[in-house]
Each structure stands twice: as structure tokens, then as C-alpha cells.
């Protein structure tokens, strides 16, 4: 599952000028395999920056290099101007992190005890009870860590990552395993901290609807390289040219239409994607001729762009 990495206090004395994260040409290799082939990205203060990409794209490797948990094999990585590998302790003091690995917490340790223990690492910690309340964990304060559900553990790890009032939050799939209300609460909390405290957030996620809604910018990775980077709306305006048709109440014979990029059946119809206005019009005409069948055109989403630019091209 996930682990919280948190150590003392916020960044002091930089006057708010130093960029929280600057990655330039980062290369990471594992033996003969290259996991990151020279990626670059920045994260600003008060920005939620999403790192998205298929399984194995290199997201966790990038986050681990950024936290000084792995050495880079090329390029440069700075966190508030510091090299995370050489200056790990000072970087840790500015960062709250939540990674995909075993939390390392004792199964018998209670939620409240874990929070109080982590709070002692810091000069000016967040009041543990307030964080537990914000993450919906107050009722579990006396529960043993090992008895928590997956989603409750995830929320505890986020609370532990926040207890040191970090200036940068690094989250690896923080909403994985959470129910819809839990996912919404995590994003609302992250956005609020961003707005109120200027917190910089780098977050990897497979939930592209959430990334589109909550990230100021996203970097899309595939096979260790950056495919696209920018604000979700601007990426869609610049790169998503297909028309997305939702056909309900019937399924047109797709094989008869030319220039359909792809189609996916649903329980009550079919989704049709095409870059051709003629094909879109032909689907509309077919629906008109077939009573009870409706076609609606919806705007392209980040998930559509991801499928078109990354997932469909992956072997
Ligand atoms: P996921 O979405 O599945 O979590 P990811 O985008 O986080 O994937 P990484 O975990 O960074 O991807 O892995 C990138 C590549 O590096 C993968 O091919 C993975 O198998 C490989 N890799 C990661 N860690 C190691 C390691 N310690 N030793 C060898 N190969 C590794």
C-alpha cells in the first residue's frame, strides 16, 4: 500500500522565490532497462500538478528521484533549489509524501498514536485531531492500524503526510482504493491547502476525470518520456480533434461507416469516436431513421486524449 514520509518543518528563508520542483532531463535506469528517458517538468507554488501515464510509465520512479529515495542516472532534479539525493534531510523537512509501498506502521499502533508520534518529528505540527477530522478519521482514532480498511489506511497516510505542514506534497495515487466520497474529500482538502497555504502538489493518478477536474497542469508520461504537458483545457483544445458520439437506445452497424476511429459498446448503446464530420453525420442519420435511438455529442475529456495519445499506442 502506501507510506507517509514526513520530517520537520517548512522551507524557511527563500522568500517564496525558489521553484518547489524543477526536473530537467531526468534519466533513471534499472540495470539495462531505462525507466525515465530524460523527462522535464516543474511544479509551482499553489499548483496541483498531475503525473499521469499507463502502468510502468515511470511515475513512481520520478517521484522517488524527487524525494531523494533513488539516485538519478542523468539530468537534474531540484526541490526548493536543493538536490534531493545530496540534501535529503533538508528536502524531507519541506516535503510531505505518500508513496505506494508498505506503510511500515505497526499493526497494533492506533490511529491517534501514529498521528501523535509523527507530530513529534516537527517543530510546529498540525494539530493531529484537526487533520483526523478533516480526513473523516475521528471515529477511528482508537482503531488499530491493522484493522483499518484500505481506504481508511490511505486517508491516515495522507494525514501523516500533512502533519508537518509541508510546503510540497508528493502523492502517488492518493485516491486509489477510496470510495467516491473519500476521493472527493481528498481532492477538496488538497485544493484547499493549495489555495490557503500556497502548497505545491505533485500527484500521480490513474483517475483522469479527477486529474482533469482538480489539476492545474498535467504531465502525461508514456514509456519514460513526456508525451504532453499543460493545462487540461489547453491540452484538449490543442490536441483533441475527434468527435465523441454517445448513441443510446440502439447500436448502428459501425462496420458500414467509414473513418470511425473506434467504437465501444455500452449496456444501452455504443460510444463512437471519429475525426470525420461525414461519419458523425452518417451516425446521426442512422439514429434518426431508427426510432427510439438518440445521439448526443460530448466534449472530449482528458481520458479520451490519454486513450488516443498514450494507451492505444502502448504495445
Ligand atoms: P504504475 O502506474 O504501475 O505504478 P509507474 O508509472 O509508477 O507504474 P514505475 O513504477 O516508475 O512506473 O516503473 C517504471 C518501469 O521501471 C517499469 O517498467 C518497472 O518495471 C521498472 N522498475 C521500477 N522499479 C524497479 C526496480 N526497483 N528494479 C527494476 N525495475 C524497476
Image (cartoon, rainbow, N blue to C red):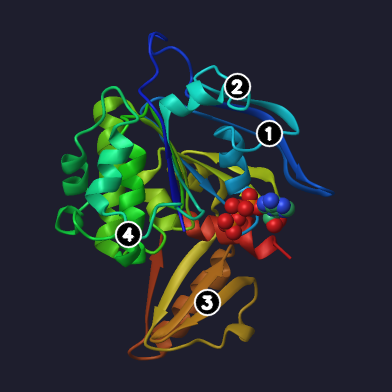
Mark 3 lies on residue: 282
Bin the neighbour count of mark 4 within 10 Å (Cα to Cα): few under 14, some 14-19, many 20 and up.
Answer: few
Bin the neighbour count of mark 2 within 10 Å (Cα to Cα): few under 14, some 14-19, many 20 and up.
Answer: some
Q: Which mark identifies residue 83?
A: 2
Q: Is residue 254 left or right of residue 176?
A: right
Q: Which residue occupies the foreground of this view, 121 or 211? A: 121
Q: Is residue 203 left or right of residue 42?
A: left
Point out the image quarter for the C terminus. bottom right
Residue 57 makes an appearance in the image: no
Query: Which label lies toward us, 1 or 3?
Result: 1
Q: CA distance from mark 2 to mark 4?
A: 36 Å
Provide residue 87's location: percent of width, then percent of height.
57, 21
- The answer to whether mark 1 and mark 4 are in CB contact below 8 A is no
User: Residue placed farthest to the right in the image?
Assistant: 32
Element on which disc 1 rests: loop
Q: CA distance from mark 2 to mark 3?
A: 57 Å
Disc nearer the start of the sequence (2/4): 2
Query: Which label lies toward us, 2 or 4?
Result: 4
Q: CA distance from mark 4 to mark 3?
A: 63 Å
Q: Is residue 47 left or right of residue 136?
A: right
Mark 1 lies on residue: 71
Mark 4 lies on residue: 108
Q: CA distance from mark 1 to mark 3?
A: 55 Å
Disc nearer the start of the sequence (2/3): 2
Element on which disc 3 rests: helix
Element on which disc 2 rests: loop
Provide residue 184's location: percent of width, then percent of height.
27, 55
Q: Which residue occupies the foreground of this view, 173 or 245? A: 173
Q: Give the residue drawn at x 29%, y 22%.
A: 123
Is 257 placed above or below 63 here? below
- The answer to whether mark 2 and mark 1 are in CB contact below 8 A is no
Classify residue 22 by image quadrant: top right
Amino acid at each position: 500500500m502506501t507510506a507517509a514520509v514526513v520530517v520537520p518543518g517548512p522551507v524557511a528563508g527563500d522568500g517564496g522565490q525558489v521553484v518547489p520542483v524543477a526536473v530537467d532531463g531526468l534519466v533513471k535506469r534499472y540495470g539495462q532497462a531505462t525507466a525515465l528517458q530524460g523527462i522535464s517538468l516543474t511544479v509551482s507554488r499553489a499548483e496541483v500538478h498531475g503525473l499521469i501515464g499507463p502502468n510502468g510509465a515511470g511515475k513512481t520512479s520520478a517521484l522517488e528521484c524527487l524525494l531523494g529515495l533513488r539516485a538519478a542516472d542523468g539530468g537534474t532534479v531540484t526541490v526548493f533549489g536543493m538536490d534531493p539525493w545530496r540534501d535529503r534531510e533538508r528536502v524531507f523537512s519541506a516535503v510531505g509524501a505518500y508513496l505506494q509501498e508498505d506503510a511500515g506502521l505497526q499493526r497494533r499502533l492506533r490511529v491517534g498514536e501514529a498521528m501523535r508520534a509523527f507530530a513529534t518529528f516537527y517543530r510546529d505540527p498540525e494539530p493531529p485531531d484537526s487533520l483526523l477530522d478533516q480526513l473523516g478519521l475521528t471515529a477511528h482514532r482508537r482503531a488499530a492500524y491493522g484493522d483499518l480498511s484500505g481506504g481508511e489506511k490511505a486517508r491516515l497516510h495522507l494525514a501523516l503526510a500533512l502533519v508537518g505542514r509541508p510546503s510540497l506534497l508528493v502523492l502517488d495515487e492518493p485516491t486509489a482504493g477510496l470510495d467516491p466520497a473519500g476521493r472527493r474529500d481528498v481532492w477538496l482538502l488538497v485544493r484547499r491547502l493549495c489555495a490557503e497555504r500556497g502548497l505545491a502538489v505533485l500527484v500521480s493518478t490513474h483517475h483522469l476525470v479527477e486529474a482533469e477536474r482538480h489539476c492545474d497542469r498535467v504531465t502525461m508520461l508514456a514509456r519514460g518520456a513526456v508525451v504532453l504537458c499543460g493545462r487540461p483545457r489547453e491540452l484538449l483544445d490543442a490536441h483533441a480533434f475527434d468527435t465523441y458520439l454517445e448513441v443510446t437506445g440502439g447500436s448502428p452497424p459501425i462496420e458500414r461507416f467509414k473513418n470511425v476511429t473506434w467504437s465501444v459498446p455500452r449496456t444501452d448503446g455504443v460510444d463512437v469516436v471519429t475525426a470525420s464530420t461525414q461519419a458523425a453525420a452518417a451516425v446521426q442519420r442512422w439514429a434518426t431513421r431508427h426510432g427510439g435511438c438518440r445521439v448526443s455529442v460530448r466534449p472530449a475529456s482528458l481520458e479520451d486524449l490519454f486513450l488516443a495519445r498514450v494507451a492505444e499506442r502502448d504495445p
